[in-house]
Image (cartoon, grey):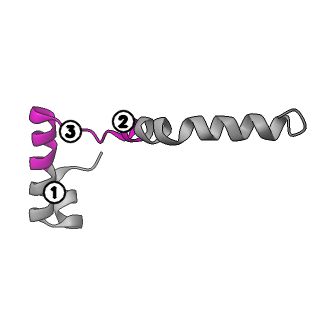
Amino acid sequence: MADIDTLIDRHGEDTVRKAFWLQEHIYEEGIAGIDFTGEAESKMRKIGPMRVKQRIEAQFPDKI
């Protein structure tokens, strides 16, 4: 792990200060997650039944 002076030399003092501030902020308050699961579930509720029907019909084209 690089020491702080090396980080400052490489990225600049302002960037290093912001990085440590962000790290502390995330540690103290966390980050709200993105609800990809909720969005995916909503979409599947809309298109899921049609997709299942299509897949079944594709497996048994002469039966339906």
The residue at which mark 2 appears reads as 38
- Counting from the top left corner in percent of width and height, residue 57 is at 78, 38
Q: Residues within 10 Å of mark 2 (few under 14, many from 20)?
A: few
Badge 3: residue crowd in 10 Å (few <14, some 14–19, many ≥20) = few
The span shown in magenta is: 20-39
State yes or no: discs 3 and 1 in contact (Cβ < 8 Å): no
Is 34 on the left-hand or right-hand side of 63? left
Task: Give the image location of residue 49, x and y in percent.
Answer: 58, 35
Tell me which label, 2 or 1, sits earlier in the chain. Answer: 1
Q: Secondary structure at mark 3?
A: loop
Q: Nearer the viewer, residue 61 or 3?
A: 61
As drawn, 28 above or below 20: above
**Of pointers 3 and 2, the one earlier in the residue sequence:** 3
Q: Check disc 3 and give the amino acid type.
A: Ala
Residue 64, quarter of the rendered image:
top right
Pointer 1 local density, CA inside 10 Å: few below 14, some 14–19, many at least 20? few
Give the secondary structure at mark 1. helix
- Residue 11, given in percent of the width and then of the height, sits at 21, 65
On the picture, is 60 further left or further right than 4? Answer: right
Label of residue 32 in the image: 3
**Quadrant in which residue 62 is drawn:** top right
The residue indicated by pointer 1 is: 5
- Looking at the rendered structure, the secondary structure element under dot 2 is helix
Q: Is residue 29 magenta?
A: yes
Q: CA distance from mark 3 to mark 2?
A: 14 Å
* Mark nearer the viewer, 3 or 2: 2
Predominant secondary structure in magenta? helix
**Among the 4 quarters of the image, the one containing residue 51:** top right
Q: Quadrant of the N terminus?
A: top left
Magenta residue check for 28: yes
Q: Residue at x 16, y 53 (%)?
A: 19
Q: Nearer the viewer, mark 2 or mark 1?
A: 2
